[in-house]
């Protein structure tokens, strides 16, 4: 492991001969060492997707010029959409939370142990008590109590957006946040808001999925992490998992059994995002893991 | 293992003191040896469910009288609903099938090896070619080719029902049968028709669940076996399972990957039914396994 | 839910006609209402196992006399071994821990939310720093720092035992405690010490199971919770689970990926023990869940 | 999908700048279209592994010359080991079998439906009855009955080897074959013999793993497919999976429950091999799936 930063490109374009060759040459000719390269071609749409990571030690192009150079010498010739990331640039993350704290605590703990490598800047919630928890785990982390009612929603979201801007937040994690975000809010953070839904989507969309699951009599319950889009619970899925239950389990059991699942599924999705391993296209994710 | 038969009671009633005691006394006082007893009480509805199995060696009541005696001395006092089964009485089963043969073949193979202990009496299908497969695995098994169109559906179902009656069928297995049964048909076999749906219900109800799953971009695909009721794909769930997929899998991959899952989930459900381990109440199953 | 306590019997004896009947009559004749009854008969050894739980509202026998009465009127006639428990009697638990804190924290958090219903009385560890963590989650919980070396081991275990006695501990949880307990210690707490081993036992017994797993190139890693007996890592298994890994995962990845698994498997085992759902016989567990 | 063949390279070498670029240029400069490229670098050993697949439509180098050209212009400069495969070149496979037929039948069925795209040339077994099964599924497939005793083992293996040679077999599948192959035999087919072991290796090596699992009281049972090397049950693992069991399951239950698992794990491993997706190095597999 060198002390140098890595550059990461996430890109997609119509498939065509020579993409891998052109991209890898761009790196090699400038003395970069490729660490990882993953690709996928959708056989239906013929779209090519790629994630490529290389070490910047001795790389001939300055960090601040890589974007422009890649655009000029590679992307432009392939009608390519791409984003450029650096492994040492930490995301500034915000956590939104309501009453249930288990996902919040899990994220903060995994941040402390280094499993989630991000700067948690703010926690925003609509319950006052959460502040104590936040401070308990990280006394430097700010908590903003922003209660939401039908009447004040627009105004309060405005407040939230201002906070997010002022802290330069680039990832929002809804850790069992029980309010529905407005489309105006969502548009500001496309594919930058990760939610955990406590069901195996698309089963049990909406409120009280454990109640729905209990009443339907399913034999497995699930959790789904996904990006928030303007369609409720229909954003691109990042990660899902399930556990087995039985007729012996009450609705309350499901709520408790689901907690470890929700924590694990949400933190996996967040980790993938923080490592720039997710590409989103057409309501679906390409997860390079 | 004795050569004697076992009796199995599946029962439910409002919960009340003394049920277990009364039921077990009925068996003990008549010199039966209890082999298994499972129970469950739904804490919401306060309904008590039980499965109890005992050996009939030396049992003082004759097999043909057990039902009446149990009704008189036990069930009637507790407002109990119950069914009585004998472990040596094999179910007469029919398999319905369309184009896909994998579940059909799996059921026939597991019957040959003794994993599914039933008399397969007839296979009914709406594709002519299936006959060859059926005869290949069991040359004594009858295949009835009954093609279905919108126009002939009522008449053809009548034909199916006549066949089922004449073979004294008491379990119907829809092994990827692609026709929707009419309510008239279903009413004749309440909780006696087991279907395999190739999704994690209630996600992806209806046609082409793998296509739906592919388009939604889920990270797991599932299969669900359930009893057929008048609400399509909404009958009581018996068994479910899932496998992990990724963006690399095409819709065709899902179809192939799902086959082993469908086979395993369907045959598990059928086995549970054949062993009289399933109680159905209120659209949900109590599975005593 | 009444305010009354439940009694729970865990018993086993050679199988014989009339056990279920005799046990359930004992409860019914004394006006108890059976809430749960599970049983199992080992077809090889012919040993009968049972867990039965009933509500004590209106029960005619006083709590302090149930043991003796059951012994006299039931157990003695069937050569039965049994233990009696009460649902409102909380276990006094001790946690042993070394360097890794994730299981410790998970247990404390699940205690706070009521998912693990026990009195955590003491935490004993061989690393000084852990005290801060313990106090962070529960400032009333005592931490005892007891470092272990080859030389002082016997003396230090004596100290540990004195602490456990003085706090009337009846369950010890080894939450990634890295010291091997002596047989003398273990004998004091038969089937009362639950360990989490970070492998799918019996694979990778002993030290560094993730290293062993990495080197062997397995495609799944596991965790196992079990009672501690005098044979290292060979005690009766309570719960196991696995997660999928790949060649892409480094040894360090396995350590991190395994954490959520260890937490979940250990806390499930502890919960089963706290709810008196585990019977141990012949190096194996009967888990009534 | 064109009618043209794909070329597939599996390669590894010490990691170094420019490998991806050099390999992809070799393909691009000769007018090949890369369909898939996967790579992995072991961070401990610094070995780079790659699988790359491209379409041969318009490829400037003739199929028969690709190996030599790649060796000369690429491999030789990077101290690279590689194998070259063509997607339309089917493997000639042999199945070895003893008494249990379920894996054999599953392989033959998946071959018929196109899920396993190989030429099954011969089945070799040490039980006479299997011939009927083989002919039942594929009347053109040869069955060789070669019984093995301690005394005749060397001679019989010689016979097996002659058969394998004469049918130009390049993949041997041990479908629950209960004989241990000699090192002489194994040496002839390095990483070309796939076995299914009915346990979660390295747990329960050797005979009767289900008996061992039953006696140990594990809560999950597994199956492992691996290449055969000279160390029994210690060859590189290709695929593993598990199912949940409980104290209720007898040893015979485990045997039956394990069958679907064995079939699924073995056929997945065979499919990966047939698609040239497995690289073996240092007793471990890199599985590009």
Image (cartoon, coloured by chain):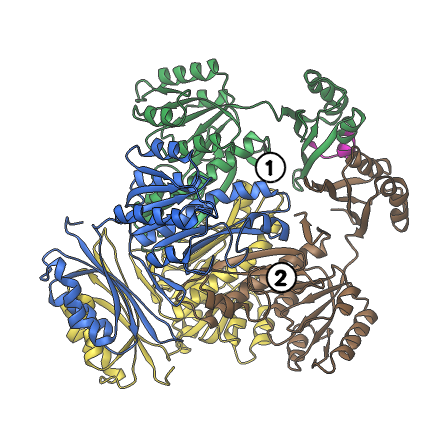
Chain colours: A yellow, B green, C brown, D blue
Q: Is residue C45 left or right of residue C165?
A: left
Quarter of the image with the C terminus of chain A in it: bottom left
Q: Is residue B234 above or below residue C246?
A: above
Quarter of the image with the N terminus of chain A in it: bottom left
Q: Is residue A47 above or below residue B235?
A: below
Expressed as whole percent of the image width and height from the top left, the position of residue C222 reads 53, 60
User: In the image, which is nearer the foreground, mark 2 or mark 1?
Assistant: 2
Q: Quadrant of residue A32?
A: bottom left
Secondary structure of residue under mark 1: strand
Secondary structure of residue under mark 2: helix
Expressed as whole percent of the image width and height from the top left, the position of residue D94 reads 33, 46
Q: Is residue D81 above or below residue A196?
A: below
Q: Which residue is mark 1?
A: B286
Expressed as whole percent of the image width and height from the top left, the position of residue A272 reads 40, 66
Q: Chain of mark 1?
A: B
Label 2 packing within 10 angstroms: few (<14), some (14-19), many (20+):
many
Q: Is residue A230 left or right of residue A256?
A: left
Q: Is residue B210 above or below residue D199?
A: above
Q: Quadrant of residue A282?
A: bottom left
Q: Which residue is mark 2?
A: C266
Q: Is residue D203 left or right of residue C136?
A: left
Expressed as whole percent of the image width and height from the top left, the position of residue C10 reads 77, 48
Q: Are marks 2 and 1 on the same chain?
A: no
Please state the extent of the stretch shown in magenta in the rendering: B13-22
Closest to the observer, C159 or B220: C159
Judge whether residue C271 is colored magenta.
no
- On residue D208, the disc is none
Residue shown at the point (51%, 45%) measured from the top left: D258
């Amino acid at each position: 492991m060198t002390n140098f930063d890595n550059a990461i490109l996430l890109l997609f374009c119509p498939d065509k001969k020579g993409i891998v060759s052109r991209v890898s040459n761009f790196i090699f000719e400038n003395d970069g060492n490729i660490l990882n390269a993953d690709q996928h071609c959708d056989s239906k749409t013929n779209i090519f997707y790629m994630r490529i990571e290389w070490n910047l030690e001795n790389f001939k192009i300055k960090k601040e010029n890589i974007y422009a150079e890649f655009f000029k010498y590679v992307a432009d010739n392939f009608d390519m959409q791409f984003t450029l990331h650096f492994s040492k640039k930490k995301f500034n993350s915000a956590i939104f939370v309501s009453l249930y704290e288990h996902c919040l605590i899990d994220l903060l703990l995994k941040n402390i142990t280094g499993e989630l490598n991000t700067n948690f800047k703010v926690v925003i919630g609509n319950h006052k008590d959460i502040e104590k928890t936040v401070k308990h785990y990280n006394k430097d982390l700010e908590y903003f109590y922003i209660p939401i009612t039908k009447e004040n929603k627009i105004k309060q979201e405005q407040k939230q957006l201002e906070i997010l801007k002022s802290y330069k937040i680039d990832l929002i994690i809804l850790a069992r946040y029980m309010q529905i975000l407005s489309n105006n809010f969502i548009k500001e953070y496309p594919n930058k808001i990760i939610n955990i839904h406590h069901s195996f989507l698309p089963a049990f969309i909406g409120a009280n999925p454990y109640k729905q699951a209990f009443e339907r009599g399913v034999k497995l319950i699930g959790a789904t992490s996904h990006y928030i889009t303007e369609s409720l619970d229909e954003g691109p899925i990042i990660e899902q998992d399930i556990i087995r239950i039985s007729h012996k389990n009450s609705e309350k059991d499901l709520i408790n059994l689901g907690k470890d699942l929700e924590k694990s599924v949400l933190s996996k999705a967040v980790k993938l995002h923080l490592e720039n391993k997710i590409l989103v296209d057409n309501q679906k994710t390409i997860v390079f893991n």
